[in-house]
Image: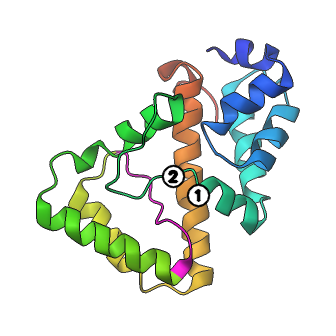
Amino acid sequence: MTLEEFDALAAADAEAALLACCASRRWAAEVAGGRPFGDPGRLRSAASAALDGLEWADVEEALAAHPRIGERAAGAGREASWSRREQSGMDAAGREVREALAEGNRRYEERFDHVFLICATGLGAAEMLAALEERLGNDAAAERVIVRRELGRIMRLRLDELLDGAAARGTGG
């Protein structure tokens, strides 16, 4: 859809569209409530500010919608389709790397009580595994900062996809 179409949506429809970009209801409501934006840069700025203002429980709500690295998102919806494409770097991964990621995911979730989140776009399986192993050494506070950063990267990519892909990337923020 175009930004003009997004700006013209009913509030509930705008929130539903935004939930595919970041599955925090508070974030979606805040961003949808800021319409009309008029240009993608204003939307991206508002979306980033709303993400920065989330309580950790809201971040956890968003994290709960993400599949583990190495697991394919189920379903036919926009968010699942984007997730599968974002994790396409896993497609060529061998058994050893897949097993190491599964074990790393288990250890990460045990340590931090949420799914390991990384903006996987453009990363190979070995790069994702290396990041996972490195981040297992973080304390909870440092990891929360990284999780917010990665969630923001994913959110921005998905906002661009929501707004007709390349047209949204060509302007603004």
- Outermost residue toward the right? 33
Residue 2 rendering spot, x and y as whole percentages: 64, 14
Q: Mark on residue 106?
A: none
- Mark 1: which secondary structure? helix
Q: Which residue in the protein does label 1 denote?
A: 63
Residue at image position (33%, 77%) is 133
* Camera sees residue 41: no
Q: What span is in magenta? A: 112-121
The residue lying at 64 percent from left, 31 percent from top is 172
Q: Residue furthest front?
A: 75
**Residue 126 picture location, percent across and down:** 21, 63
Q: Amino acid at mark 2?
A: His
- The alpha-carbon separation of the residues under discs 2 and 1 comes to 5 Å
Magenta-colored segment: predominant secondary structure: loop
Q: Which residue is mark 2?
A: 66
* Quadrant containing the N terminus in the rendered view: top right
Specify the quadrant of the image occupied by residue 59.
bottom right
Magenta segment: does it hold 140?
Answer: no
Evaluate if marks 2 and 1 touch, with contact meaning CB atoms under 8 Å apart.
yes
Report whether 90 appears left or right of 63: left
Residue nearest the viewer, comparing 121 with 37: 121
Residue 38 sits above or below residue 45 on the image: above
Q: Residue at x 67, y 38 (%)?
A: 19
Q: Nearer the viewer, residue 108 or 51?
A: 108
Residue 90 x, y percent position in the rendering: 24, 50
- Tell me the crowding category of disc 2: few under 14, some 14 to 19, or many 20 or more residues within 10 angstroms, Cα based: many
Quadrant the C terminus occupies:
top right
Up/down of 137 relative to 31, above or below: below
Which secondary structure lies at badge 2?
Answer: loop
